[in-house]
Amino acid sequence: MLPVNQYMRTRIWALAWPVVLEMSGQMLAGTLVTAMVGHLGAISLAAVSLAIMVQMAATMAFAAAGTGAAAIISREAGAGNYQAVRSISGQAVMLAGALGTILAALGYVSSSVIFSVLDADAAVAELSSSLLRMMFLFTPLYLIMAVSNYILRAVGRTIDSFWVSVLNNGTNIVVSYLLIYGIGLPRLDALGAAWGTVLGQTLGGTLAVIMLIRSPLIGLRFSDVFAYRRNEVERVLRVSIPAALEQAAMQGGRIAFTFLLVGVGTVQFAAHQIAMQVESISFLPGFGFSVAAMTLVGFSLGQGVSHRAARYVRLTRSIGFWLMSVMGAVFFFFAEELTALFIKDPEVLYWGSLCVKIAAVEQPTIALNYVMGGALRGAGDTKWPMYVTTIGIWLVRLPLIYLFITVWKHPITTAWWITAADFLFRSGILWWRFETGKWNKSI
């Protein structure tokens, strides 16, 4: 028999690594499709990028319905109450389909207005709005896939959500390639990328539901999806609404952050974008350990052993902290080499490598932010991550960036130091909240 700590570490890694691979696949698909569209010219690239950005920003908040479902399902699974697991899973899928239908209708009729608000170039806005209208029509299937993946992870089946992602991303890459270039199929140019995206989501969503039906831990039935159970829906929404508001604050803050940085000039903004691309690699283990913490906390609380939940969090926090610290060291000592993978322009390379070095300093606090946030969400304490994210982004990061970048004209590196301070603030508050023990409550 394995020692307790070794057994717990094994469980953490077993949950985390499929999620890391899943996120890696998403990143790879996004990079390849972007490269394909880039060959069509600047207008097509800008239009597809904007359409995907808006769709993701709009759907992430609604997909947070899966957070509430996952917190409840992992706890019920820990308690061995698999009838409740099946019933709540059905209500969560139903909720995803209903919210997706509402969002599809709203997005379809308002897509042209969105790009006029964003003040996009006329040619870009016209193409992007037509792409977005088509993509919004498939929103119900995307949300069903996203929520189903939350459910699979909640019962510890992160390997299943990984295979859903493989089908989704693989379909996206292959279909986009065939339709963008017209290989054996009609050439659709930028529209081919949109079709690749939605067909991938359609097949991924279908496979995810099949896995929910076939899983011995869930055993979803269609009667669970189409039978409205008010108490269970309200229970899911109580936990999900703060998570949705957190995502809305995060996605809105990301867009505002980008607009505030445009004023630094073309060279520094390009350096910022490249540094973001480099740093995004480190988010992969962060999200993986966040899912592990979320699942293990919920499961342990369902078993009635809160001390084990706390022990899992501390182990996950330690693993995530040291792993991402090592990644930070790689970023710091190889900043120029990593930046040079994307661009050779000496001025962009200079500013980009400086930003990557600052990103290196952020890595330990990003790890803590991911793990502690995931732990609190797994316990159903979704309000505190919402409070901390909203305050950190909208009352700390964005006002300081407006002052230093827009008003006082500081260089792009100042924005990265402000972001590092934001992560330090947020991780510290989330750590404090966890150590109070007040997250251990019924949901």
Image (tube, helix red, strand yellow):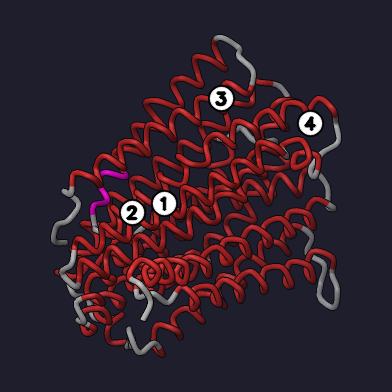
Relative height, residue 388 to residue 367 (above, below)? above
Mark toward the start of the polypeptide (4 vs 3):
4
* Label 4 residue SS: helix
- x then y, percent, for residue 142: 49, 67
Mark toward the start of the polypeptide (1 vs 3):
1
> Quarter-wise, where is residue 390 in the image?
top left
Mark toward the start of the polypeptide (1 vs 4):
1
Distance from the alpha carbon under mark 1 to that under mark 4: 33 Å
Q: Which residues are magenta?
A: 381-385
- x then y, percent, for residue 292: 40, 63
In the picture of the structure, the residue carrying the numbered disc 4 is 349
Label 2 Cα crowd, 10 Å radius (few <14 / some 14-19 / many 20+): some
On-image quarter of the N terminus: bottom left
The answer, for residue 431, to whether it is visible in the render is yes
Distance from the alpha carbon under mark 1 to that under mark 3: 28 Å
Residue type highlighted by circle 4: Leu
- x then y, percent, for residue 373: 35, 49
Label 1 Cα crowd, 10 Å radius (few <14 / some 14-19 / many 20+): some
Q: Is residue 300 left or right of residue 293?
A: left
Q: Disc number at residue 318?
A: 1
Residue type highlighted by circle 3: Ala
In the picture of the structure, the residue carrying the numbered disc 3 is 415
- Of tags 1 and 3, the one toward the viewer is 1
Label 4 Cα crowd, 10 Å radius (few <14 / some 14-19 / many 20+): many
Instruction: Determine the main secondary structure of the stretch shown in magenta.
Output: helix
Residue type highlighted by circle 2: Arg
Which residue shows up at 38% across the image and 74% down it? 156
* Magenta stretch holds residue 383: yes
Q: Is residue 25 left or right of residue 392?
A: right
Label 1 with label 2: CB-CB less than 8 Å: yes
- Of tags 1 and 4, the one toward the viewer is 1
The answer, for residue 147, to whether it is visible in the render is no
